[in-house]
Amino acid sequence: MQKKIMIIAGGDWQIELVKKAKAMGHYVICSNLYEDSPAFPYADACEVANVLDKEKNLEIARKYMPDAVISDQSDISVPTVAYLNHQLGLRGIGEEKAALFTDKSLQRQFCREHGIPVPDFKLCKTPEDALPLLEKYGKIIIKPIDSQSSRGVSTITTREQLWEKYQTALDWSNREKLFLAEEYIGGDEFTIDGLVVNGHHYPLCISVKEMYETNPNISRMQSYSYESPDYDYELLRQTNKRLVETAGLPMGLTHSEYKFWKGKFYLVEAGARGGGSNLSAKIVPFMSGIDNYEYLIKEALGEPVDEALVRDHQFSRDKYVVMRFFDFGEGVVERVEGLDLLKNHPMLLDYQLEVKPGDKLEQPKYGRLRPGHFVIGGDDREEVKAQANFLIQNVRVVFRDKE
């Protein structure tokens, strides 16, 4: 039976969720800030509203009276979705859980109280508030309390940098003009994506990150596998499961990031949504064999789901995926070479590259400004790596001032 589903946010990363809801036979209403939002052509009804504007989105919802309100791959949409579900009496994670999984300061405090490793931190309003932490550790991270895609995140080693960068962190904080300062910890960084079914968390895939040399707060490559020869992925699964279930998240997708430091996985952040750049839409189903979007939609509608299928699922130890973001450098684009390789490669799961002649490329200040990426996967780790390297070598930008 057809139901009405409202999807908050309508950018590139919501297209697959809209398409999935439509494929399941539902009527889809999509709201987003721009009239030409990328997901709008795939929806039945489109409404212009800022994702952060709860009242405008509630007005739209009351116009259509949806049976479910959902979103994915967007932290800033999570509180709005929770608010609409509460106001309309629909199934969701609740406003308290939405705050816990989007406000980094609340999340850090929760972890501290429940013995989940997090860096030392302090909630700040002024650079003076963060100064004691900088003097104690010599190197800190400052970040907005509730933004996304690494917007407003800076590594700080001097007082001058702190005074220069703190306002950017404040500017990207949405709920309240505060920022988080925290101890800088080393180690490799990881992502873990999962699914909550009937209050039980199931991990679906893990990656290890490689960061941009010009900005160590932004991922350049993520390599996905079930096991690692260097790290205890089972410890990561159990650490994240404890976090999600202790927090009491009742349903939906999860995306968490950790750093491995001194024998422990330290939480960087945990979201009540899937990973961006189509991680939840393309990589999670490929790596896990689980249709996580179907579970998300059915649980939001209050329809029965098969938890045993997820609980007893046997994951492939062979599947391997590389998500690689392009790192072309800086300059004015003369031409782009190798686009046909992206369009026609048999192992490619997804790609995005909207660079065109005349564009001016700069080193990305945050994740959404990366010039594009591709996702490649298969059952042979070495072959996936080789093909990823082939694409990096052959998909390139030629700048006007250099060959």
Image (cartoon, grey):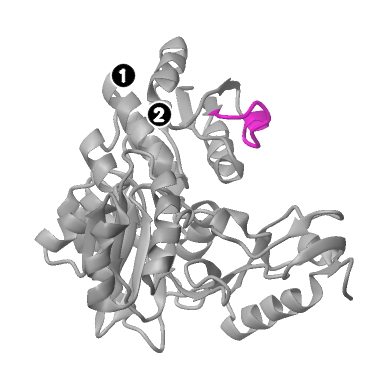
Q: What residue is drawn where x is 63% and y is 30%?
A: 40
Dot 1 surroundings within 10 Å: few (below 14), some, or many (20 or more)?
some
Q: Position of residue 79 (x, y in %)?
A: 34, 36
Considering the image in quadrants, where does the C terminus appear?
bottom right
Residue at which label 1 appears: 88
Amino acid identity at mark 1: Leu
Between 120 and 396, the residue placed more toward the observer is 120
Dot 2 surroundings within 10 Å: few (below 14), some, or many (20 or more)?
many
124 sits to left or right of 378: left
Q: What residue is drawn where x is 63% and y is 60%?
A: 370
Magenta span of residues: 32-42
Amino acid identity at mark 2: Val
* Secondary element type, mark 1: helix
* Secondary element type, mark 2: strand
- Tell me which label, 1 or 2, sits earlier in the chain: 2
Q: Where is residue 262 in the image (x, y as percent from the top left)?
A: 25, 85
Q: What residue is drawn where x is 41% and y is 48%?
A: 147
256 sits to left or right of 11: left
Residue 191 in sight from this viewpoint:
no
Residue 82: quarter of image: top left
Between 3 and 127, the residue placed more toward the observer is 127
Between 265 and 317, the residue placed more toward the observer is 265
Residue 236: quarter of image: bottom left
Q: Where is residue 155 in the image (x, y as percent from the top left)?
A: 42, 69
Query: Seen from this angle, which residue lies furthest top?
Result: 63
